[in-house]
Amino acid sequence: MKQGTFENVGIVGAGTMGTGIAQVASTFRHTVYIYDPYPDQFIKSRNSIEKILSHQISKGRITPDERDGILNRIHFVSHIKDFSTCEIVFEAILEDVKAKKDQLSRIEGIVSKNCILATNTSSLSISSLSSALKKPGRFLGIHFFNPAAVMKLVEIIPSVSTAPETVSRAKKILDSWQKIPVLAKDTPGFIVNRVARPFYGEALRIYEEGIADAATIDWAMKEMGGFKMGPFELMDMIGNDVNYTVTETVFRDFYFDPRFKPSFVQKRMVEAGWLGKKTGRGFYDYRKGAVMPEPNRDRNLGEKIFNRILTMLINEAADAVLMHIATKEEVDLAMKYGVNYPKGLLEWANEIGLEIILAHLEQLQNEYGEYRYRPNPLLKRKVASGEKFF
Ligand SMILES: NC(=O)c1ccc[n+]([C@@H]2O[C@H](COP(=O)([O-])OP(=O)(O)OC[C@H]3O[C@@H](n4cnc5c(N)ncnc54)[C@H](O)[C@@H]3O)[C@@H](O)[C@H]2O)c1
């Protein structure tokens, strides 16, 4: 399965994402060196890969020999000096600029001159991290989605200093790992974490206004839109702390653009420790014996909720294209393969009719008088010229 000319992969951080990337690289027969300053993480990391692989054996997807091969190719190392033979090193440590810069600069002192350095950051600027390096041309963002072994999408994010050759080499590696790489501009949230914000933000707005409760909004998005999970179930699963922080970061980094404004309801939940599934309480009650609330299955209300959230998602997707964050094709791929949306948002807009989406946005802006609902210029231009996205 292995293609190309490189052998060894280094990973810093044996947490959720580092472990997932290690599994992917080893599955494609690379020798993997994974470093973490906390040795307990090694046991957790190995156990989690073993568990996933045992499940795959039980499903007949891999053989016990293949499992052993994948596990044996992953070496948990207590020093980054083992990265000296690596042709690519992924940084997947905690989301902290200083810690990441420190590690990246240490790694640069160890690896060969041709080694690609990549960060898996979800929210930090790639250009800012690149300033820690003497040779930033070999550095870029390679953003996997969780679980990395399952999710096909990977965002490739060059910084202002990344050499074009680094981008093409990274793409080749990800292609050989059977991933779907998309190129994104180094802007807050890249593609997925930016375009997906209204899925949560508009749902929270509808909830805060008392138009519907969480169960009804979740039902509407699944029933009318075919989404696998509703926004509140998803926020509880991701963790309200994690989800809120991403929203707050994107809001701040977009110079407080009101369309990304965080929600007080979610903030209070975080403050109270209602983080979702992991703490037993979030928008839903997960404690033993708790009964899940029934949605209001009024189809008119459901359509209203679904149309409003979808319209806002499409508006954001259009903005990502307008601002050259990615191409229209890549924006659609990103949402289908990064967050499992049932359709690409721009393809969906075409199906519904761009003039209907525009009319809905104008009606929301008219009603609320808020800049949050302003229709994207690209959408307006397309409607004016009678064009579609595809
Ligand atoms: N979890 C997700 O859904 C997800 C998705 C995409 C990207 N990311 C990004 O991936 C990165 C890692 O996230 P995660 O969820 O795997 O975190 P995690 O907390 O599961 O793992 C982080 C690992 O880094 C190690 N670590 C902490 N400080 C370190 C240091 N100074 N040097 C080396 N290792 C250190 C920890 O011991 C831990 O094993 C973050 O940048 C995050 O934003 C996370």
Image (tube, grey):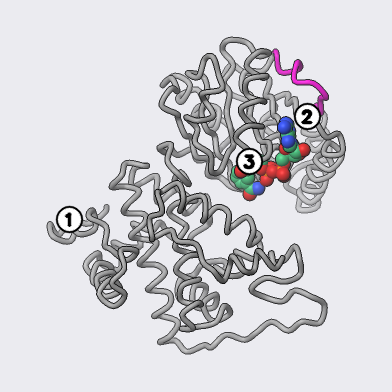
Q: Which residues are magenta?
A: 75-84
- Determine if residue 13 is in view: no
Q: Residue 381, labelled with which disc?
A: 1
**Residue 114 in magenta?**
no
Marks 2 and 1, the one that precedes in the sequence: 2
* Residue plotted at (50% across, 22% down): 169
| Quadrant the N terminus occupies | top right
Marks 3 and 1, the one that precedes in the sequence: 3
Question: Looking at numbered disc 1 in the image, what kind of residue is underneath it?
Answer: Arg
> Label 3 to label 1, Cα distance in Å?
39 Å
**Does residue 207 lie above or below 349 as drawn?**
below
* Residue plotted at (47% across, 50% down): 250
> Label 2 to label 1, Cα distance in Å?
52 Å
Q: Residues within 10 Å of mark 1 (few under 14, many from 20)?
A: few
Q: Residue 74, labelled with which disc?
A: 2
Question: Looking at numbered disc 2 in the image, what kind of residue is underneath it?
Answer: Ile
State which image quarter holds ligand 1. top right
User: Is label 3 in a helix, a strand or a loop?
Assistant: loop
* Quadrant in which residue 360 is drawn: bottom left
* Quadrant in which residue 38 is drawn: top right
Q: Residues within 10 Å of mark 2 (few under 14, many from 20)?
A: many
Marks 3 and 2, the one that precedes in the sequence: 2
Label 3 CB, ligand 1: below 8 Å? Answer: yes
* Residue plotted at (40% across, 56% down): 344
> Label 3 to label 2, Cα distance in Å?
24 Å
- The image position of residue 202, as x and y in percent, is 44, 68
